[in-house]
Amino acid sequence: MDIIKQAKQSILASTALSDHDIDRIMSSLLSVPVDAADIYFQSSHFESWVMEGGLIKEGNHGIERGAGVRAVVGDKTGFAYSDRIELPVLLEAADNVKAIIRQGQNTRTALTHSNRWPQYYSSVNPLKSLADRQKVELLHKIDRETRQLDSRVEEVIISLTGVHDSILVANQDGALAADIRPLVRLNVSVIVAADGRRERGSMGGGGRCDYQCFLDQDLALDYGREAVRQALVNLEAVDAPAGNMTVVLGPGWPGILLHEAIGHGLEGDFNRKGTSAFSGRVGERVASELCTVVDDGTLPGRRGSLSIDDEGTPTEQTVLIENGVLKGYMQDKLNARLMGVEPTGNGRRESYAHLPMPRMTNTYMLSGHHEPEEIIKSVKKGLYAKNFGGGQVDITSGKFVFSACEAYLIEDGELTRPVKGATLIGNGPDVLTRVSMVGNDLALDGGVGTCGKDGQSVPVGVGQPTLKIDGLTVGGTGV
Amino acid sequence: MQNHEEINHLEAIVQTILDTAKKQGATAAEAGLNVENGLSITARLGEAETIEHHRDQGLGVTVYFGQCKGSASSTDLSEDSIIETVSAACSFARFTSEDVYAGLPSQELLATQFPALDLYHPWSFDVDQGIALAIECEQAARDFHPDISNSEGATVSSHQGIRVLGNSLGFLHSMNSTRHSISCSVLARRGESMQRDYWYSVDRNAGKLESAKAIGEKAASRTLQRLQARSLTPRHCPVLFAAEVASGLIGSLIGAISGGNLYRKSSFLLDALDTRIFPDFVHIHEQPHLPGALGSAAYDGEGVATRARDIVVEGVLQSYILSTYSARKLGMQSTGNAGGVHNLTLDSGTNDWQALLKQMDTGLLITELMGQGVNMVTGDYSRGAAGFWVEQGEIQYPVEEITIAGNLKAMFKSIVAVGNDVDYRGNIRTGSILIERMAIAGE
């Protein structure tokens, strides 16, 4: 069965809405002169399981279903949504949306189904990929084995979530596109205690696949081992230093630096409006020539991947920075049209109840030529940040911040003591110009990222090889 | 939508959910339902940019089979969906573990009195009026100073909703409320320096919002003040958290004394009950029944009656913040905080803003915090910050690209003063907070 039929089946089968009705709603939207219009239908099933204190504590199942109706003229947008997929409700929504446009007449074509884009994940329903009993057994097994790892483990909290999301987008040129998106995530966090100190550690992962991925190669148990290892390292950690120093970032999840410091500033909306520190800088050098950064929605099965974005545009690998030179921005349809460029498949929305905007998919830096050991060896005194918590950026001033949850001092080319509570802060447009070595060990994160913008959350991926940055402010207590 | 007929209809749906759960064998159940309507209008560069009509609805149900629990939610309120949702919850309850602490609240803790809280003030404006107001707000910001160079727009937003909560102990009540806001965000440029800041006003009653013009001007003035900010060299100094960021410090306190973090031993304030955690002038209390306030409620997310109560008296921790479950885990009684606190208030001193700057003399005034560098287990605190360097009680210049660090336990104990410039825009009410000494890193 093709993807459009599947999506229609899961979203519209329980409603009375037909293709003809979708046409009528679109015709209503197009009775005024618009530059773009779309109707976005969504049906999402999700579940979550939580294990804590050795008990399966929570089991939750949810359904979200609804439609969003949008009309755009110039840079003006009218938007309405409803969780009732019913013709009168959606016609009323279309009427409300048109309030942004005042006069005129438009013509339109009938719905066409295009189904020609590659799929980067299967349309499998992950919620059904294991029997509930097997999910429960998996949680018990992780709990048991994680507790046995070390006598200092006091508490283990495990969460398992799965989403099966179907979307259908009709737009003003009559095209109909659809996608079915599985997403799973498993997370293990632990509390360890010894000698009056307590610390926590956390590890997780997932992607656009089913629960089987956690069983392959004992991945689920690895999360437990990694969480315990990290927590025990932190038990030994000393206060972080403070001040400007050389920082080496480990491969994988520390790529959140790129996401925060660079990625957000390269989203099309900010640049169209001229509110980003990167506005108007295409063609300029914004990074050391060692740096090539891409956003890529086409990686199979990755958490940030999409076959099509939420406007029906197929995703691609978009080169953002090539050998240090800014090449382009990430675009949705509205901002691409207003900036006179092609959309890049980055138009994303949290749900039918939110407006699409340019968002990242999987953002990462390509490998360089140095061995990671060589990079650490080259540092006399500095900080090695192996893993991070969250981060944040002010896209206008360019200032970004993120917190290390596992970091070490580098002394004379060797990792010595672990440090706690290190926050890194810097300036987005500057930071990549100070990259002096790039490792040959590109890694993508395990599938844990969630990005927030304007109150909307979407799953994303990040990645990078080991990087050496000459001069970044580390904010610890050891002034 | 807020007529009796609609409320009766929604309460009937909740009753149906509870009855369905019972029919499917649940020994106890709790159900909630909410319906919300709203309109948000954004103007940018003098014209309407987006008009968003919101309509959200959702139901949630939790069932108990003895001590096993399952829950489910849906955005579809149809009869078929209700049956499906309850079945999903019941099916989960077959797989969750027996937990002796699980269950509905004790009957005697459920709310029986429902004071009028003055939370419902519909604001009827049409799209054109909304656009005009948003344009007025943004225009005030753009006209404020020639260095205001760009804008992210001004937004006028109005929401009204009904929440219904019921359980199988016979509790069934609904709450109407409204929430309106005006916000504005603009950019300023001087030389190479580009900055952005914002301001907003929010209230249950649109008549009590700050004027559109005042909000625009305040957004512009805050943005201008940040131009040409510098970093600081590493140092230790006093830090004054402006009221709009001071609420975050109290938020960390709430996290540390919340039942969930306590029974998981993930708090830096384990076993701190009846001990001194602040200087003796600090008084923190909860005021759930304040008329018209953003955090007011007669009952919590489980139907447990809320009441005015002390959390910290003369610096000593008097009470935790507990739901039914976390209370039972700790061998205590729910404090009516399932779903959070209700107008948690740190009593102000007599000092106004200027006096606090004078009292600090030389130090750092923080107006923005970035990142998530708060470790709830250890209390370690290290966050990105922006604000102003102050000498002899006078603002000298804006600062950015710095971090402030310390440990929350020590920070709480070293609070020197609390200003009377209270920020009423949230569920935590506090004036600015002066802390004796923190570590600053930069450059």
Image (cartoon, coloured by chain):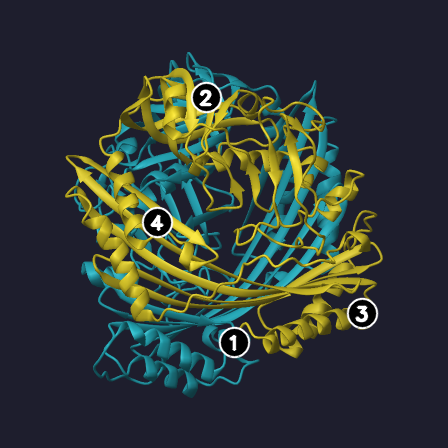
Chain colours: A cyan, B yellow
Q: Which residue is mark 2?
A: A476
Horizontal side of B290 relative to A321 (left or right) equals: right
Q: Amino acid at mark 3?
A: Lys
Q: Earlier in the sequence, mark 1 or mark 2?
A: 1
Residue A49: image location, x then y, percent: 67, 53
Label 1, label 4: how far apart the Cα atoms are: 35 Å
Pair 2/4: label in front = 2
Q: Is residue B427 above or below residue A337?
A: above
Residue A324 in view in this figure? yes
Residue occupying image coordinates x 68% and y 47%: B307
Q: Residues within 10 Å of mark 3 (few under 14, many from 20)?
A: some
Q: Are marks 1 and 2 on the same chain?
A: yes
Q: Residues within 10 Å of mark 4 (few under 14, many from 20)?
A: many
| Label number found at residue A295 | 4
Residue occupying image coordinates x 69% and y 70%: B14
Front-most of residues A241 and B102: B102
Label 4, label 3: how far apart the Cα atoms are: 51 Å
Q: Secondary structure at mark 4?
A: strand
Label 2, label 4: how far apart the Cα atoms are: 32 Å
Residue B432: image location, x then y, percent: 45, 32
Q: Which residue is mark 3?
A: B22
Q: Residues within 10 Å of mark 1 (few under 14, many from 20)?
A: many
| Label number found at residue A84 | 1
